[in-house]
Amino acid sequence: MSASLAPAPTARRGVALLAALAVAPACRLAIARYAVPAGSPDRVGCAGCGAPTRLDRPWPALGPAARCPGCRRRIGAPPWTVEAALLLALAVVAVVDGPPAVRLALAWWLGWAVPLCFVDVAVHRLPDRLTLPAAAGTWALLGVAAVTGPGPGPWLRAVAGALVLALFFASTTLLLGARGFGLGDAKLALSAGALLGWYGWPLLVLGPALACVLSGVVALVLLVARRVRWSSHLPFGPYLVLGTIAAVLLTVRP
């Protein structure tokens, strides 16, 4: 019996790897397309030779090698980084306890969060075409979880939490300008806040607090290393994603 059950973890890891490789081209396309300065048109092809980048011809431009088939210039994110991030996202979904619909909402959000992090690191922006579908799908799937499970209470708390967190980020932009959080962060909070709010009000505080601590530590390290200045603007989106994941893992593991 033990011999027949032994391959199961290996099989699950193989399925996870295949899932990451299947989703990776779409994520890489989003990164390559939207990692452009604000106000610039979306990038639809190689910056070197102009060869189009499309999902119907993903290799090698949208594969792990991330190279243009014509001029061999790198396309979007560095090789294998997106695939590794997606595998980590799948690992998070695998270890979090909860109903299938809630875990599916988490998986949906992480699927959008991965390209959002890469874009924010590259050009310091969180495009609406990624943040808004992330929020819409997360709210909808949490709604399904509420209908099939505990009722409307957790979903209403999730929506309220998302709106509160988004309004907080947006208000700092209006009050502090460039020193506050960006409107892109507020739109990302519509999905991150919904997940945190679903699990309870304490997580709605814990997630952003962890994000601020992480960003502060990284900023301090970069300052000491003289990689940034006090006036430098650092992207906050990746830290909000990491803070949300950390808060969920710390409180919702079986």
Image: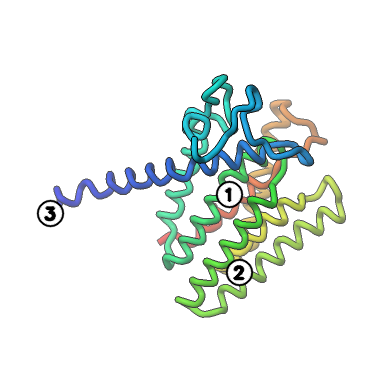
- Identity, as a three-letter code, of the amino acid under mark 3: Met
Residue carrying label 1: 113
Instruction: Choose top left, top right, bottom left or bottom right for residue 41.
Output: top right
Where residue 192 appears, as percent x and y from the top left, is 61, 58
- Image quadrant occupied by the N terminus: bottom left
| 141 versus 115 height, above or below | below
Task: Identify the residue at image location x=82%, y=36%.
Answer: 231
**Image point (71%, 66%), residue name:** 164
Residue at the disc numbered 3: 1
Looking at the image, residue 237 sits to the left or right of residue 6; the answer is: right
| Kind of residue sitting beneath label 1 | Ala
List x then y, in percent, for residue 213.
66, 47
Asked if the residues shown at circle 1 and circle 3 are in contact, with their CB atoms under 8 angstroms apart, the answer is: no
**Alpha carbon separation for disc pair 2 and 1:** 18 Å
How many numbered discs sit on the rendered protein? 3
Sequence-first disc among 1 and 3: 3
For label 2, the crowd category at 10 Å Cα-Cα, with few meaning under 14, some 14 to 19 and many 20 or more, is many
Query: Label 1 to label 3, Cα distance in Å?
Result: 40 Å
Q: Amino acid at mark 2?
A: Ala
First in sequence: mark 2 or mark 1?
Answer: 1
The residue that label 2 is drawn on is 158
